[in-house]
Image (tube, rainbow, N blue to C red):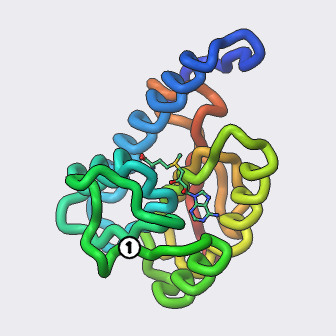
Amino acid sequence: MRAMTQIDTQRISRLEKLLYRMEAQVACLAWVFQELSGMPGPVFEMGLGHGRTFSHLRRYLPGRDIYVFDRAVNSYPDCTPQADHIILGELAATLPAAAARFAGQVVLAHSDVGSFSQEHNSAMAGLVSAHLAPALAEGALVLSDLPITVPGTTRLPLPPGAREDRYYIYRFSRR
Ligand SMILES: C[S@@+](CC[C@H](N)C(=O)[O-])C[C@H]1O[C@@H](n2cnc3c(N)ncnc32)[C@H](O)[C@@H]1O
C-alpha cells in the first residue's frame, strides 16, 4: 500500500481538511472491505452521527451485524439501524459493556467520534484506546478518525487515495 503524500495542515482550508478526511475515509473503508472477505464477525461503528458511514458499511458489508454507538440517534431515517443494533449512551459506559458482550468477536471497529474540539478528541482517543481491545477478534481491523493506541494493535500504512494523518488504520493481534 502507498498513501498519498503528507499535507501541511497549517496551509489548507477547513473545506480541504473535510475533503481530505472524507477521501481518506472512503479509501480506507474500501481497503478494509477487501481485507474482511473471509473474516466473518460483527462490526462496531462508533459515532453513528447522520449515518453516512453506517450506510456505507451496510452497503459494502451486506449481511454483517453492524452495531452502532452514539449518545442519541440523529441519523437520516434511511441510515438508521434496527433498534437492537443501536447502542445508545456515553461511550465511556457503552464501549466497556459492549466489549465484554462481544469479547473476541469484532472483526472491524470503525471509530468516528472526533469533533473540532482538541479536548474532546483527546478524551475520545483515550477512551477508545482504553476499552476497545477486549472486543477484537484476532486480525481485526480498527479504523479511526483520530490516532489511537489500542493495546495489541499495529498501525498500518494508508491505502492509495488517502493522505497521511487524515485517517488511521490498525491491525489487532493477541499474539
Ligand atoms: C463525526 S460524527 C459521526 C459521523 C458519522 N460516522 C457519519 O458518517 O454520519 C461523531 C458522532 O460521535 C458521537 N459522539 C461523540 N462523542 C461521543 C461520546 N462520548 N459518546 C457517544 N457518542 C459520542 C456524536 O454524538 C456524533 O454523532
Q: Name the image quarter holding residue 37.
A: bottom left
**Residue type at the position of mark 1:** Ile
Residue 140 seen in the figure:
no
The residue located at (48%, 67%) in the rendering is: 69
Q: Position of residue 172 (x, y in %)?
A: 58, 65
Characterize the local packing of mark 1: few (<14), some (14-19) or many (20 or more) Cα atoms within 10 angstroms: some
Q: Residue furthest top?
A: 11
Q: Is residue 50 above or below residue 99?
A: above
Q: Residue at x 51, y 28 (%)?
A: 162
Say whether residue 129 is visible. Answer: yes
Q: Quadrant of residue 134?
A: bottom right
Residue under label 1, please give it.
86
Q: Residue at x 40, y 56 (%)?
A: 74
Quadrant position of residue 152: bottom right
As drawn, the residue found furthest toward the bottom would be 101
- Which of 128 and 119 lies nearest the eye of the viewer? 119
The percent position of residue 141, horizontal first and vertical second, equals 49, 59
Could you tell me residue 167's position as x and y percent? 58, 39
Residue under the image location 51 percent in, 86 percent down: 103
